Amino acid sequence: MAIFVLVHGAWGGSYGFRKVRGPLRAAGHEVFTPSLTGIGERAHLTSPQVCLTTHVTDVVNTVLYEDLRDIVLLGWSYGGFVVTGALEQIGDRVAHLVFLDAFVPGDGDSVFGNTGGHGAGVLGGEWLVPPAPREYDDPAEAEWANARRTPQPAGCFTEPVRLPRPLEEWPFTRTYIKATGEPRPEPGGPFWAAADRVRQSPAWRYREIATNHMIPSNRPEELAGLLLELTAGGGALRR
């Protein structure tokens, strides 16, 4: 049995993994999908004080209070910053680290910095950043999910992440899953840049899913299948 901890992205909530939890649990695994403070299911707790550290603590406390070990820790999109920041406290409990079309930050990076200062006008003004538009394959899913996307405190995007040593020096395995249906912008954008980098590294496993950024909604069975392959030894995930 594997233990999955799936961390959602910006402006979302744990509900984003609702179609992925079932297949993983049906295969006999435990699945935790912590909700990050101030957004999604916990939007009622939003405030200007909510920041990246808040979300790192959400994940760290889930792992520590449940006493989870040898986990598969996945960060989707902004969740890549959250799982990276969590390693300082729970890195010894991670067996596999997975980035799902996500930021792969280094020590001292921030979302604001990794996006080249995109949204400077918003971040320089109001403390709540409105959701970025997202597209879904199913119009009904789009209507359902977009109604649940909430503004997010700017501190989540401006606070630098803390990473004691490079990801490649940790003893767990590392996998990057790229949404190849997402257009490559000019310049390439942080998710494409991360994918291009890890594809060249023997320290990483790399996989693709042919849909846009909303992988858990558009391709939940395929995503669950990749995660199950990883827990079975990861042979199909090797480059």
Image (spheres, rainbow, N blue to C red):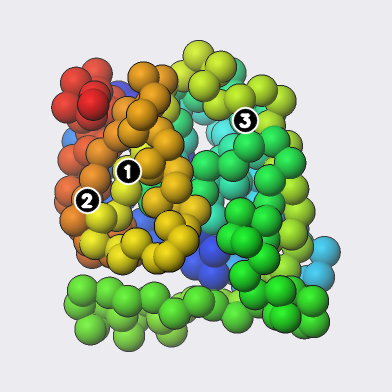
Q: Compared with residue 80, is residue 230 higher up or lower down, i.e. above or below?
A: above
Residue for badge 1:
177
Select label 3 or label 2 by which is in front. Answer: 2
Q: Compared with residue 218, is residue 191 higher up or lower down, i.e. above or below?
A: above
In percent of width and height, residue 226 lies at 22, 38
Q: Amino acid at mark 1?
A: Ile
Residue for badge 3:
87
Disc 1 crowd, CA 10 A, few/some/many (<14, 14-19, 20+): many
Residue for badge 2:
209
Residue at point 55% right, 26% down? Answer: 167
In percent of width and height, residue 225 lies at 18, 40
From the image, which quarter does the C terminus lie in?
Answer: top left
Q: Quadrant of residue 183?
A: bottom left
**Contact between labelled residues 3 and 1, with CB atoms less than 8 Å apart:** no
Residue at point 55% right, 18% down? Answer: 170
For marks 1 and 2, give the CA distance: 7 Å
**Contact between labelled residues 2 and 1, with CB atoms less than 8 Å apart:** yes
Q: Nearer the viewer, residue 119 or 37?
A: 119
Select label 1 or label 3 by which is in front. Answer: 1
Viewed as shown, does residue 19 lie left or right of 186?
Answer: left
Whichever of labels 3 and 2 marks the residue nearer the N terminus, that label is 3
Q: Amino acid at mark 2?
A: Ile
In percent of width and height, residue 228 lies at 23, 33
Specify the farthest residue to the front: 186
Viewed as shown, does residue 163 lie left or right of 201?
Answer: right
Q: Secondary structure at mark 2?
A: strand
**Contact between labelled residues 2 and 3, with CB atoms less than 8 Å apart:** no
Residue at point 32% right, 43% down? Answer: 177
Q: Secondary structure at mark 1?
A: strand
Q: Nearer the viewer, residue 99 or 60?
A: 99
Q: Amino acid at mark 3?
A: Leu
Residue 129 appearing in the image? yes
